Amino acid sequence: MASPRIYQKNERRHIEVAQTGDDDLGPFKLLPGTWTNAEVAPGVQDGRGWNMIALPFGGARPPFRVLLNQYNESLMFTLVDKGVPNRGVRLDPDVNSTDQRIVTLDYQQSIHQVAAADFPESGEAGGAGLAIHHEPGLFLHMLSHETNGIDIGRLATIPHGDSALGLGTSAVVDGLAPIPETVTALAVGVGTDIENSPYLAPYKHFRDNVFTGTVDPVQVPGFPGFNPLDATRLLRLGNDQLNVTRTTVLDFDTTLEEAGIVNIPFIVREANAASMRSTFWIQEIAQDDGSTLLRMQYLQVVMLDFFIPRPDGMPGPIRWPHVSINTMVKVAEPDPEVGKYMTTNRA
């Protein structure tokens, strides 16, 4: 990866419509534009987003339900804020300055349900077209004064009443970056005897009755569905027989250094969002005609804390993974008209 440009002290901060390939964006330079689930036919989207969440379910035994969604997503990166100054007193000899400069790339995420199922059945899973997530946020690229190799951050605001800061590192690797194979959505603190524990019956249900959403296994032989006990399998299968020439890896974690999540009181009291880790793989895929397709995969795990005491006797509440995966392609560059009233007037 090219070294970030060093901003001069007298250089103006400015906001502009982001451009793909802009070296000022550093590890984010392939992101500007709109990413979505590829259309398999006009107006029909692929539905390659999948997630799983455990939710408190009053009156049920066990007192929670597991909800699985298939979804379509739009993720738009539009504006870049360059030369954002953070004032400091300690000198960074690499840039000969006490101040830190940051480049930020804003995003808007919108997710709509394609299909859903829950167990025990609540009657609240909803149908196709239901809005299930909206998130405005910022990706941050720290140009100097990094600590412990941390060079990127993600600020996310969630309408439920959560605000998250994840910190992390970026890397560019040749070829296909590996997708982790040991990701499970099984709750932490309830044991692992899924065969015999009544408490784990919802997980066993979806292991034995695999959620396939709108995909017909008869028409797509061998489709494994979304299994919460092997949550990244569909990501890994989606990489078969692709000529990925290079991958940019963006890894964010709210448990690093001063990162974290802040929630409104109800969330803290009832089902606290305690941590979030997300990894984005930006893949450059060589096509037969010599062009390059930009594709994004991601894995996100949010840990929700609810129910005390834990059945395993350890301190604290049970920790419930909320797992999301998706595979998207870039379909458009940023629209200058969208950002023209928010960019810096440099005339």
Image (cartoon, rainbow, N blue to C red):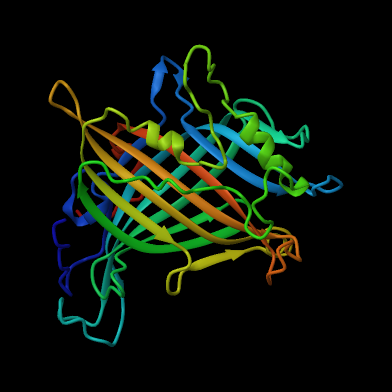
Viewer-proximal residue among 96 and 214: 214
Q: Is residue 17 visible?
A: no
| Left or right: where 137 falls relative to 310 | left
Instruction: Please identify the residue farthest to the top as the structure is shown.
Output: 219
Above or below, comparing residue 62 to residue 164 in the picture: above
Quadrant housing residue 104: bottom left
Q: How many marks?
A: 0
Where residue 167 appears, as percent x and y from the top left, is 39, 64
- Which image quadrant: the N terminus? bottom left
Quadrant housing residue 140: bottom left
| Left or right: where 248 falls relative to 121 | left
| Left or right: where 157 falls relative to 57 | left
Viewer-proximal residue among 16 and 215: 215
Residue shown at 49%/34% (left/top)?
A: 49
| Left or right: where 333 falls relative to 21 | right
Q: Is residue 181 visible?
A: yes
Residue shown at 42%/45% (left/top)?
A: 181
Residue shown at 41%/14% (left/top)?
A: 41
Residue shown at 37%/31% (left/top)?
A: 238
Where residue 56 appears, as percent x and y from the top left, is 75, 50
Above or below, comparing residue 50 to residue 167 in the picture: above
Above or below, comparing residue 312 to residue 321 in the picture: below
Where residue 346 appears, as percent x and y from the top left, is 21, 55
Where residue 157 appears, as percent x and y from the top left, is 52, 55
Instruction: Please identify the residue farthest to the bottom as the structure is shown.
Output: 89
Quadrant housing residue 83: bottom left
Viewer-proximal residue among 52 and 184: 184
